[in-house]
Amino acid sequence: MVKKTLIQALGNRFGSLQSAPYVCLRADDRTGQVSGGEWLDINGQQWSQIEEVFIFAFIYEGAPNWEKNRWGCDYSCPRAITD
């Protein structure tokens, strides 16, 4: 049975790269004031232990809608396993 979990700043569920779920949220930036934004790291050495990753975002109080926000999603997969 695969254990499912959620990584999010709410509830201080930042995860871990060294143990399951092998995913870690570096910091909480609900204010939008951090110039570097938020980073979600995935331990690529543990791909065999990760069935799927679902990435989502919420709009918090103070942000009227997505059009008024600067947002983006970049990913990098150095030394990726390509089967």
Image (spheres, rainbow, N blue to C red):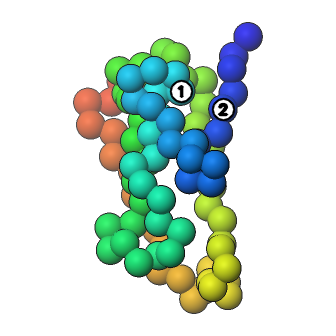
Task: Work out whether residue 81 can be spotted.
Answer: yes
Residue drawn where x is 33% and y is 39% of the image: 77
User: As rendered, which of 76 and 58 lies closer to the eye?
Assistant: 58
Q: List x then y, in percent, for residue 60.
A: 65, 74
Q: List x then y, in percent, for residue 2.
A: 69, 16
Image vertical order of residue 31 relative to residue 18, above or below: below
Instruction: Categorize mark 2 by other alpha carbons within 10 Å: few (<14), some (14-19), many (20+).
Output: few
Q: Quarter of the image containing the C terminus?
A: top left
**Residue that badge 2 annotates:** 5
* Gap in angstroms between the C-alphas marked 1 and 2: 7 Å
In-image side of 23 versus 4 (left or right): left
Q: Secondary structure at mark 1?
A: loop
Task: Work out whether residue 83 can be spotted.
Answer: no
User: As rendered, which of 50 and 6 lies closer to the eye?
Assistant: 6
Task: Please report contact status of discs 1 and 2: CB closer than 8 Å, yes or no.
Answer: yes
Classify residue 62 by image quadrant.
bottom right
Q: List x then y, in percent, for residue 53.
A: 58, 37
Q: Which mark is residue 21?
A: 1
> What amino acid is found at the position of numbered circle 2 in the picture?
Thr
In-image side of 59 versus 17 (left or right): right
Residue drawn where x is 68% and y is 20% of the image: 3
Q: List x then y, in percent, for residue 79.
A: 26, 30
Choose the circle earlier in sequence order: 1 or 2.
2
Q: Quarter of the image containing the N terminus?
A: top right
> What amino acid is found at the position of numbered circle 1 in the picture?
Pro
User: As rendered, which of 35 and 55 lies closer to the eye?
Assistant: 35
Q: Which residue lies most toward the right here?
A: 1
